[in-house]
Image (cartoon, rainbow, N blue to C red):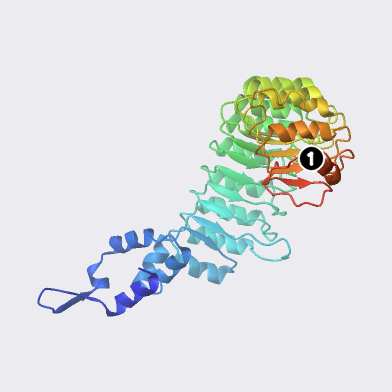
Amino acid sequence: MSMAEMMSKERETRYTHNNGESTACINEALRDDELRAILAKLECTKDKEVFGLVCKRWLHLQSSERRKLCARAGPHMLRRLASRFFGLLELDLSQSLSRSFGITDSDLSVVADGFPCLRILHLCNCKGITDAGLVAIGSSLHSLQSLDLSHCKKVTDKGLSAAAKGCNDLRFLRLEGCRFITDTALKALSENCRNLEALVLQGCMRITDSGLTILASGCRQLKYLDLNKCTNVGDAGISSISEACYASLRTLKVWDCYKVGDGAIYNLAKVCKSIETLIIGGCRDITDESIKSLVLSCHYSLKNLRMDWCLSITDSSVSCILMNCKNLEGLDVRCCEELTDGAFSGLGRGDDHAANLKVLKLGNCPKITLSGLAIVLDSCKLLTYLDVSSCPHITKAGLDEAGLQIPETCKVNFNGSLTEPLDMLV
């Protein structure tokens, strides 16, 4: 029965006894818990919205059951929303990049007072937020588990420390682009948020090895750590995280952290046996030996490896990766100019080497030719994306002339113009 039919039944249908006498409408016959059960079975979002149009009682029940809301509202509207959706668990107030205004500290005060059960709060690109807003969050939202402050450029250590002290159960924290965040904020997280599992610090260039060491002393359950473009982070800081979170760490991103070298990778290989995604692009001091050590340690768990612009990487480590990492799904070796067809020579020898590979990026590897690509295509039948842009020996015409068959599901980037999926080895 559609929601339109249900509304019609509510207005017209009455239950009758055998004598045919009208007794009660559906609203009188069904208890609140029964109506909630009906609402829970509606899978279509539109049907759930229509449910609330039947009558005020149904609207109230629908509002009380709503758990997620995306809004662009000021204090007055937020108060109205809070009175209606008092059981809300997730609130998204994120702003678009183009907006120069939006959510303010006064709005966050209303949120803190009006949504006490909130567990997830998105504030991405809320440029008007300052430390005062985070103080309000810390003072009231004690059940908060996920907080996105990406590109909230006025936020400093003071505000984040207040939020950390009040939100002790924080599991996910995103601080991408928060340029004033320093090691002091990491100290507050270490002392107050012991259950933290995911932390994004991309572009927080004031973070240092000392801060990571302090973070590791308290936050030992990290599964996901993004330090991309944290240019003051080096081997010591990464090693501290590896040793503290050896049992939980699954994703580590240190793209363009040029101070990270073999020391961090050797330590990662020694203690972290379950790493799944490793982003080390731009770490130019990393060599074959540390990569091979990592592969031998994490050959079963490793699924995604990005090491573009690792200029010391040669065929030996890439061959080791392809031959040993049975569950590898994504590999990015763009701009590793020393790579040749020899990197793929071990493939196609009877074993299912690299059989699960879906994404392979070889752009700007000038020594790779059609011969090497032929080996890849013969062995990697599940490829969905192949980047061979700026590889002078590999062209569309040459591919056709050689009779090489690209899997139907695979997109090939020959000239750098093909848009890549956003989740592809980022």
Q: Position of residue 219 (x, y in %)?
A: 58, 33
Q: Which amino acid is tagged 1?
A: Gly
Q: Position of residue 66 (x, y in %)?
A: 44, 61
Q: Position of residue 137 (x, y in %)?
A: 56, 53
Q: Residues within 10 Å of mark 1 (few under 14, many from 20)?
A: few
Q: Quadrant of residue 305?
A: top right
Q: Is residue 286 visible?
A: no
As displayed, is residue 41 above or below residue 58? above
Left or right of 188 on screen, residue 117: left
Q: Quadrant of residue 345?
A: top right
- Looking at the picture, tell me which residue is in the foreground, 288 or 85: 288
Q: Is residue 363 visible?
A: yes
As displayed, is residue 352 above or below residue 60? above
As displayed, is residue 340 above or below residue 129? above
As displayed, is residue 15 above or below residue 387? below
**What quarter of the picture does the N terminus occupy?**
bottom left
- Residue indicated by mark 1: 403
Left or right of 109 on screen, residue 256: right
Instruction: Tell me which residue sits at (81%, 36%) in the image.
Output: 282
Instruction: Tell me which residue sits at (51%, 52%) in the image.
Output: 141
Element under disc 1: loop
Q: Position of residue 18 (x, y in %)?
A: 11, 74
